[in-house]
Amino acid sequence: MTDASLHLWRNARLAPGADPAHVIENAAIAVRAGRIEWFGPEAEIPPAFANVANAAVHDLEARLVTPGLVDCHTHLVFAGNRAEEFAMRLEGATYEEVAKQGGGIVSTVRNTRAASEDALFAQSLRRLDALLAEGVTALEIKSGYGLDLPTERKILRVARRLAAARPVTIATTFLGAHALPAEYAGRADAYIDHVCNDMLPALHAEGLVDAVDVFCERIAFTLEQAERVFTAAERLNLPVKMHAEQLSLMGGAQLAAKHRALSADHLEFLDEAGVIAMRESGTVAVLLPGAFYFIREKQLPPIDLLRRHGVPIALATDNNPGTSPTTSLLLMLNMGCTLFRLSVAEVLAGVTRHGAKALGHPDVAGEIKVGAMADFVAWEIDSLSELAYWSGLDRCALVVRHGVPTIDKRIVR
C-alpha cells in the first residue's frame, strides 16, 4: 500500500532543539500530514518510513537544520513611524519625556486610528515578510495602538488577515492597556473599566484574542489596574502576559507570576523576588535587546539571577515604531550575546523552544520532536554559532512550515 502523504527529509545535520551541543549528523525527518512522525540518524530509519513506495524524498544536502524561529513579542501592526522621536532622543530627550510631550505610543495611536484596514495590512505585511525571510515560522502580534474598540478591532483583524495571507502561525494578544488615550486623560481607572468590561469581551467574542497583555509602569498602568485586566482575562479563560520592570521596579513580574502568566517581558529592573516568583509559576522571561539598544538603556536584565533560578529566557524583536523598529530576529541573537552576555545556546533556545513556551500556541513547539508540527529551517552555515555571528548576511536557505516548503533560497550544490 502506498502513502503519498509521507515526506522524508534526508541528509540533514539536524539540531532538533537548536542546541549546538546536540547535532545529529546524516539525519532524516519523516513528516506526514504536516506533523513529525520520526527523526534521527538515516541509518536508523524504521522500515515503516524507509519502505513507503510513494514517499516524497527531499535532499537537504548536509545543511544545518533547526526548528523554525519564534518571535514571541511583536507590535507588528501599526501605521506610520517615529523617526522624528528617534532624533529627539539623540538630542537627549528620555523615553518618558517624549511620552509626556504627546509622542510615544499615543502618536502611533493617532496614525493607526487614521489608517484604513487595507492600508494597515499593506504596511504590516512588509514587516512580516522581512521576519519570514529569516526563518520565522511563528510569532505574536499585539494590539495596543488603537486604545479604542474600533481600532483595536482593526489591528487584530489585520493580524488575522496576515496569518491567512502568509504561511505563518500568528498568536494575537490584546494590549488595550498599553497607554492612556487622550480622551481618558486623568481617568485611568475609567479607561481600565472600558478595557475590561467593553473592549476585551467584545473582541474575544469575535475570536480575535488569544492572550491579554498590560503595560505596568509609571508612564502606563499600576499594579492594581493591571490585576483588574488579568482578572477580566481569566473570566474568559485567556492567558495573560505583562510588560514588566522595563523602566522601574514595580513588582509587575510578581503579579504576572501570581496569575501564572505566559511571560513577563523586558525585565531590566527585575529583582530576585520577581525571578523566584517567575520560576515557581513557570513564567518565561522575554528579553528584548532591540529596545534596550534603541533607547540606550544602561540597566541590564538580571541574567545571572534568571540562570541561577532556572527561569527560561526567550528573546524577541519587540518590533514596534518607537523603541525597537527592527524586523530581524537574527540580529536579536547577536544583541542577546553582545549586550546581555548570553551564550549562543541560550539565544538559540530563546527563539525556539523558550520562545514557543512564551507564545503559548498549541501548534508551536519550538523544537523538532515526534508529534510536533514540522516547522524547520535549513541554513547555509557550518555551525549554529553563525546564526548569532553574521549580521545582514542571508543564511536562510529553506523554510518548511507544517511540512510544506514556504521559502526556498537554496544554493545549488
Image: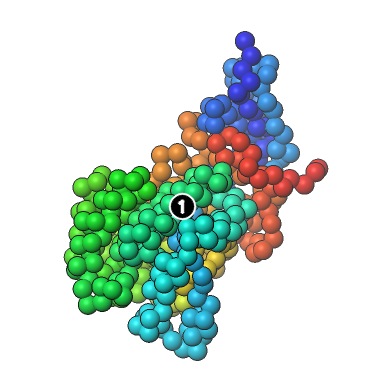
Q: Is residue 190 left or right of residue 287?
A: left
Furthest residue toward bottom: 91
Q: Is residue 376 left or right of residue 311?
A: right
Q: Residue at x 41, y 54 (%)?
A: 156
Q: Residue at x 67, y 37 (%)?
A: 12
Q: Nearer the viewer, residue 162 or 344?
A: 162
Residue 40 visible in the snapshot: no
Residue 194 higher or lower than 160, as above or below = below
Task: Please identify the quarter of the rendering in which residue 386 is found.
Answer: bottom right
Q: Nearer the viewer, residue 336 or 293?
A: 293
Residue 18 higher or lower than 44, as above or below = below
Q: Residue at x 48, y 61 (%)?
A: 116
In percent of width and height, residue 82 lies at 50, 75
On-image quarter of the C terminus: top right
Furthest residue toward top: 1
In percent of width and height, residue 409 lies at 72, 47
In percent of width and height, residue 271 lies at 30, 67
On-image quarter of the N terminus: top right
- The local secondary structure at tag 1 comes to helix
Q: Nearer the viewer, residue 380 or 154?
A: 154
Q: Which residue is mark 1?
A: 159
Residue 151 visible in the snapshot: yes
Q: Residue at x 51, y 70 (%)?
A: 80
In percent of width and height, residue 406 lies at 63, 42
The amino acid beneath tag 1 is Ala
